[in-house]
């Protein structure tokens, strides 16, 4: 049996036309794989942290401003915590109903 070029061309064209006709149905035939949200979340956090690290490494002015802001914020939060702790020891018992023992001081 001898196959000529015209028969091959017709067969290839027919296969391609059928393939193109079936392509819109492929998503309905295959199972969809979902990328977990955690991968996107961790990737974006990593990207943000690496960007901040690069900015701090490359820009001394930004680094000193950021460290100054962090020190100031830590100082404010620390003052509030100490103030509340002292107020709680002197004042009413905590809201969970536990007794507050006075701090033990060295004599």
Image (tube, rainbow, N blue to C red):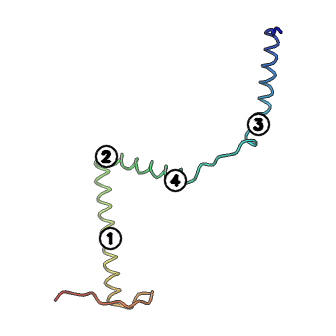
Query: Quarter of the image holding residue 74?
Result: bottom left
Which residue position is annotated with label 3? 24
Q: Give the label on residue 76, or none.
A: 1
Task: Name the quarter where the N terminus is drawn.
Answer: top right
Q: Give the label on residue 57, or none.
A: 2
Badge 4, how many Cα within 10 Å: few under 14, some, many 20+?
few
Question: How far apart in space, not on screen, are marks 1 and 2 (Cα)?
Answer: 27 Å
Ranked by sequence position, the earlier of labels 1 and 2 is 2
Helix, strand or loop status at disc 1: helix
Ranked by sequence position, the earlier of labels 4 and 2 is 4
Q: Give the number of the mark in front: 2 or 3.
A: 3
Task: Name the quarter where the C terminus is drawn.
Answer: bottom left
Front position in the image: 18 or 75: 18
The residue positioned 44% from the left and 90% from the top of the image is 97
Badge 2, how many Cα within 10 Å: few under 14, some, many 20+?
few
Residue 91 x, y percent position in the rendering: 35, 90
Q: Is residue 11 above or below residue 99?
A: above
Q: Give the label on residue 41, or none.
A: 4
Question: How far apart in space, not on screen, are marks 4 and 2 (Cα)?
Answer: 24 Å
């Amino acid at each position: 049996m001898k196959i000529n070029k015209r028969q091959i061309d017709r067969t290839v064209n027919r296969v391609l036309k059928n393939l193109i006709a079936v392509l819109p149905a492929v998503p309905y035939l295959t199972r969809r794989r979902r990328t977990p949200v955690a991968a996107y979340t961790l990737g974006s956090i990593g990207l943000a942290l690496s960007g901040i690290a690069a900015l701090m490494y490359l820009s001394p002015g930004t680094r000193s401003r950021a460290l100054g802001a962090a020190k100031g914020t830590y100082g404010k939060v620390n003052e509030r915590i100490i103030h509340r702790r002292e107020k709680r020891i002197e004042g009413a018992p905590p809201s969970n109903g536990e007794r507050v023992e006075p701090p033990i001081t060295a004599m």
